Image (cartoon, rainbow, N blue to C red):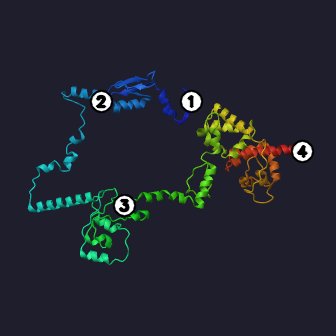
């Protein structure tokens, strides 16, 4: 619960938690005994110190939990007391069993049967011996295939039979390179495949050599990848193919340059170069790029003290969201209109006097850099007709508010005569403000409307004289 502390007179978001820092005495319960002890906050360190291990904590609940759960010094004292009282007839403290010493529970290696297998008689039969020999032979062949599939010298193929050679001679299409097919790769791959791509062709059966060209069929120990094929990279290489040559890697590095040559990407890059940003080229150029920092945050950050993190949301809730809103606020009456902002920040956001003086100084500096009056800004937003005088009047304010024309019509303000009557009823402006505030009119927008009513009232009085 937020509030102001009655001791340090400061505002805190969690007053209940903050009051624990002003607590100078706490009571701890000694583990293993019914006695308790009072400890006091140290005047030098401003912390509570543990009487057993001298650990220090700032609040009482933390040191109480430390003594109750994690203080090793208290636990050692408790264990020594238990050993002294072990001969007594009644011992209230029992040592906790270890995980592996619980009844009915065996260690993990015993549950798996490693140690229990020593007590189980195993009868060796001829069938078991044959199965063991087959299993060991299969494992040896698997290890050999795994070793042959690693990086090493040139691949060695089994000698093809006559049928495969005859089929290879009948092939009429020229072969430039022999690349492994996915089916052959799956059949020739060992159960344990190394994650590193291999440059060596694994062992295969004779029926997989039908695609060999005649020039390579009689040389089973020669390399099967043509060197000239490295200059023609193929992006659809199967899994397990040899790694790309440096020529292919060079061409891959040149792809972004070719991609940036398109008109769309080059236009985005040129726009970002002029704007001084480094946005990614895959963003759509038709969408507006949002500023990283809003105008209000930039204004608050450039003050004597950076207040962007504290009051950016407060200004947005007040209705000051853009640079135009900030300029309109700066041109308001510093005595009456700025006082409304001061009261709003003090009541709703607990802004102190020093921060308000910093904000006021920034508003005055921005006001000095702006023209004294804004020229009438023509705007067609929200205008329902060519002779809508209320819309024209809203468009000529310091901050155009044509989007609220329906709200003015709802309140009965449809022509200049209605505006003149409202200007004369200055004592009822607060009622109009309450009605419009309930219908999504911000406080800053009401100040703009109020300033326009004052200006119109003064012009009416000057014409009457």
Q: Quadrant of the C terminus?
A: top right
Residues at circles 2 and 3 in contact by the CB criterion of under 8 Å: no
| Left or right, residue 201 beside residue 269 | left
Neighbour tally class for label 1: few under 14, some 14-19, many 20 plus, Cα within 10 Å: few
Q: Give the labeled residue for mark 1.
A: 10
User: Circle 4 — which element?
Assistant: helix
Any part of residue 270 in sight? yes
Residue at figure coordinates x 22%, y 30% from the top left = 91
Please tell me in which quadrant of the rendered image residue 40 appears.
top left
| Left or right, residue 140 beside residue 123 | right
Q: Give the labeled residue for mark 2.
A: 75
Quick one: which residue is furthest to the right in this view?
A: 465
Residue 79 percent coordinates (x, y): 26, 29
Residues at circles 3 and 4 in contact by the CB criterion of under 8 Å: no
Q: Give the labeled residue for mark 4.
A: 464
Neighbour tally class for label 4: few under 14, some 14-19, many 20 plus, Cα within 10 Å: few
Any part of residue 211 in sight? no
Q: Give the labeled residue for mark 3.
A: 242
Residue 126 percent coordinates (x, y): 9, 62
Residue 9 percent coordinates (x, y): 57, 28
> Which numbered disc flags the more N-terminal residue, 2 or 1?
1
> Which numbered disc flags the more N-terminal residue, 4 or 2?
2
Which numbered disc covers residue 227? Answer: none
- Between label 2 and label 3, give the one nearer the viewer: 3
User: Circle 3 — which element?
Assistant: loop
Q: Nearer the viewer, residue 254 or 364?
A: 254
């Amino acid at each position: 619960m937020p509030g102001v502390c009655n001791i340090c007179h400061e505002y805190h978001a969690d007053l209940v938690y903050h009051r624990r820092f002003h607590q100078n005495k706490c009571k701890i319960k000694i583990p293993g005994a019914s006695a308790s002890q009072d400890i006091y906050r140290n005047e030098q360190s401003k912390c509570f110190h543990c009487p057993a291990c001298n650990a220090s904590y700032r609040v009482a609940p933390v040191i109480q939990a430390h003594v109750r759960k994690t203080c090793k010094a208290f636990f050692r004292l408790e264990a020594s007391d238990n050993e002294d009282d072990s001969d007594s007839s009644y011992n209230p403290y029992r040592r906790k069993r270890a995980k592996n010493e619980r009844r009915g529970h065996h260690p993990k290696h015993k549950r798996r049967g490693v140690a229990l297998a020593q007590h189980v008689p195993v009868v060796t039969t001829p069938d078991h011996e044959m199965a063991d020999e087959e299993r060991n032979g299969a494992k040896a062949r698997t290890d050999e295939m795994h070793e042959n599939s690693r990086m090493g010298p040139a691949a060695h193929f089994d000698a093809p039979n006559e049928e495969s050679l005859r089929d290879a001679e009948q092939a009429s299409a020229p072969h430039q390179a022999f690349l492994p097919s996915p089916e052959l790769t799956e059949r020739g791959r060992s159960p344990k495949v190394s994650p590193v791509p291999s440059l060596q062709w694994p062992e295969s059966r004779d029926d997989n050599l039908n695609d060999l060209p005649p020039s390579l069929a009689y040389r089973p120990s020669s390399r099967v990848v043509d060197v000239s094929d490295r200059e023609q990279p193929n992006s659809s290489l199967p899994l397990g193919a040899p790694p790309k040559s440096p020529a292919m890697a060079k061409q891959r590095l040149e792809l972004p340059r070719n991609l940036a040559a398109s008109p769309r990407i080059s236009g985005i890059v040129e726009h970002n170069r002029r704007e001084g940003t480094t946005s990614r080229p895959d963003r759509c150029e038709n969408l507006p790029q949002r500023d990283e920092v809003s105008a209000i945050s930039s204004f608050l950050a450039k003050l004597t003290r950076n207040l962007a993190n504290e009051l950016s949301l407060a200004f947005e809730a007040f209705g000051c969201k853009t640079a135009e809103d900030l300029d309109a606020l700066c041109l308001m009456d510093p005595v009456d209109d700025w006082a409304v902002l001061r009261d709003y920040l003090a009541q709703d956001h607990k802004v102190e006097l020093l921060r308000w003086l910093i904000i006021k100084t920034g508003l005055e500096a921005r006001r000095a850099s702006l023209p004294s009056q804004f020229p009438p800004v023509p705007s067609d937003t929200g205008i329902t007709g060519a002779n809508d005088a209320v819309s024209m009047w809203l468009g000529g304010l310091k901050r155009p508010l044509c989007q609220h024309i329906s709200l003015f019509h709802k309140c009965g303000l449809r022509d200049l005569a209605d505006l003149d009557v409202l200007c004369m009823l200055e004592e009822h402006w607060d009622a109009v403000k309450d009605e419009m505030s309930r219908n999504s009119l911000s406080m800053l927008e009401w100040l703009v409307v109020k300033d326009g009513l004052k200006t119109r009232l003064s012009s009416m009085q000057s014409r009457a004289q």
